[in-house]
Image (cartoon, grey):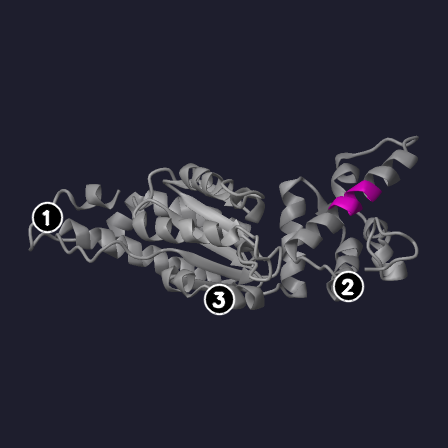
Amino acid sequence: MLDAIAKDTAAPDAPVDLQAEFEASNIDEVLGKLDRELVGLKPVKTRIREIAALLLVDRLRRKFGLVSGAPTLHMNFTGNPGTGKTTVALRMAEILHRLGYVREGHMVAVTRDDLVGQYVGHTAPKTREVIKRAMGGVLFIDEAYYLYKPENERDYGQESIEILLQCMENNRDDLVVILAGYKDKMDRFFNSNPGMRSRIAHHLDFPDYGVGELKSIAEIMLAEQNYRLSEAAAKALEEYLPIRMRLPHFSNARSVRNGLDRARLRQANRLFTSRDRVLTKTDLITIEESDIRGSRVFAEGKLEGEPETKAR
C-alpha cells in the first residue's frame, strides 16, 4: 500500500503545502467525529492527532523519496470497560485508510474465542481466517491477555500469539493490530510475551470518566435518540451517577447507556399508565425526575435486574 504513495517522486525543490494535504486527506472529519462521539479523553485524542500528523508528514516525505520504512502502528489500548477503546479503534482505522496506510479501513473486533481452537489443529486456521478478514484494516483484540494461559499446558493460545507476531511483522503496511484490556492484566501479558511488546509502538491509557463527563455523555446519548432531561431529572442524574460509580461492575459509558435505557422504560410505562390524557411531543421526549429516581440504585444501592437477596 505504501509503495503506491512513493511511486511518483517530487522534485527536491518542489513546494509542499501541508495544509492542502491535510484537507485533501479528510482526516479532520474523522478527528471531529471523534471529538463529538467521545467526551473528555484529552490525552488519548492528543495521541491520535500526533499519530495522524506523523502519518501525514510521512506521506509528504515519500513524495520526495524520503523513505524511512513503514511506521510501526500496532497499538495497545488499556482502560476499564466503556471508556471508548472500541470507538477510537474504529476512527483510527478510518484515519489509516484516508492516509493510504491500509486498503479498506474496516475494523474486525475479536476475542480469544475467535482466535483459539479447542483441539489440536484448530487454532492456526481460526487465527489465519481472522487475520485474512482484517487485512487492509485494523484487527482489534479485546481482552488480549486471555490469549496467554501458561497455567494450562494444553492451551493453544500461544500458537495464536506466534501467528499474530509473524503477521504483525510481515504485514505492517496493510494491517494494524490493536490489543485492548485492563492495564494491569495487559502489563502482565507483555511481561510474559516480550515479542508482542516489541511490536507495539503506541500505548494509550483510557481513564475513567468523572461525574460531569458521564452526565455529558448521557445528554449526548439521549439527544441521539431524541430525548432530553427535564431540569429536575438532570439534577437526579447528577445524584445517581456517583452512587452507580461506587457499585461493582461499573462500566463507564456502558453503564450510563444501560441506566438510560431503563429510565426510558420507566418513562414509557409512566406515559402508558396515564394514557387517558392527550400527550404532546414534549411529553414523548422528556425524561422526568421520577424516571431517574425510580432506579433501585437510589432505594437499595442495587442494580435493576438483580435478585432481591443479592447486591453486586
Mark earlier in primary sequence (3, 2): 3
Residue at 79% in and 34% down = 280
- What separation in Å lies between label 3 and label 1 (alpha carbons)? 46 Å
Magenta stretch?
A: 261-266
Secondary structure at numbered mark 3:
helix
Question: Residue 181: horizontal and vertical position, in percent?
Answer: 56, 59
In the figure, residue 49 lies in which quadrant? bottom left
Q: Residue at x 46, y 40 (%)?
A: 130
**Which quadrant would the N terminus be assigned to in this image?**
top left
Residue 289, position in %: x, y? 82, 52
Kind of residue at badge 1: Ala
One can see residue 133 in this view? yes
Out of 12 and 270, give the one closest to the viewer: 12
Q: Quadrant of the C terminus?
A: bottom right
Q: Nearer the viewer, mark 3 or mark 2?
A: 3
Magenta highlight: main SS:
helix
* Between 197 and 1, the one nearer to me in the picture: 197
* Residue at numbered disc 1: 10
The residue lying toward the viewer, choosing from 18 and 188, is: 188
> Does the magenta segment cover residue 186?
no
**In screen coordinates, is 260 left or right of 161?**
right
Residue 264 is covered by the magenta coloring = yes
Tell me if residue 84 can be seen. no
Q: Amino acid at mark 2?
A: Leu
The residue located at (24%, 46%) in the rendering is 2
The residue under label 2 is 247
Q: Give how far apart the Cα atoms at labels 1 and 2 are.
A: 60 Å
